[in-house]
Image (cartoon, rainbow, N blue to C red):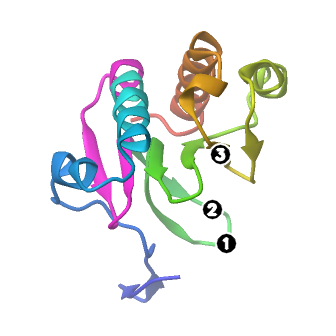
Amino acid sequence: MGTTVEGRVANKTQATDASVDSFFDKIEPQARRDDAKAVAALMARCAGAPPRMWGSSIVGFDSYHYRYESGREGDAPRIGLSPRKAALVLYIMGGFPRYEALLSKLGKVTTGKACIYIKKLSDVDLAVLEKLITESLAYLRKLYPA
């Protein structure tokens, strides 16, 4: 979890003022850096928002405030990415009507609860990725309006 704020547990991953460009400059190997920059440009265009660091290793775009029935609440990026050692991790909210169908057409990826793992950007269909991103954003904007 994270630190306590006003008696509630705050998210561990918070938006920061750290430089996204400096973060990208440290990514190795160069191919992973290039893939991360390409996905970041796509996400920025789709979100209509500039990149922002969330914690020390997530580049997020736009944000929303959520509140669960349990009382837990916080802020999170609507979409994001993290260039990890093993794969480029995309944080795209699933659950919208065409998510599974689009995911099945994306290409060579693995998935987690709210993550898509890409070894190489050349392994995926960029048009399908763009649809996943835009439909995820639309879904989140409906669930959590600005």
Disc 1 residue type? Ser
Q: Distance between the residues labelled 2 and 1?
A: 5 Å
Q: Which residue appears at 18% of the width and 45% of the height?
A: 21
Q: Give the range drawn in magenta.
A: 44-62
Residue 33 counted in the magenta span: no
Disc 2 residue type? Tyr
In the image, residue 6 sits, relative to residue 79, either above or below, namely below
Frontmost of labels 2 and 3 is: 3
Q: How far apart are marks 2 and 3 (CA)?
A: 27 Å
Mark 1 or mark 3: which comes first in sequence? 1
In the image, residue 56 sits, relative to residue 44, either above or below, namely below
Q: Residue 137 location in percent, x, y?
A: 52, 28
* Residue on which the image places disc 2: 68
Q: Which mark is residue 117?
A: 3
Q: Quadrant of residue 134 in the image?
A: top right
Which quarter shows the C terminus?
top left
Element type where label 1 sits in the image: loop
Element type where label 2 sits in the image: loop
* Residue on which the image places disc 1: 70
Q: Which residue appears at 65% of the width and 23% of the height?
A: 124
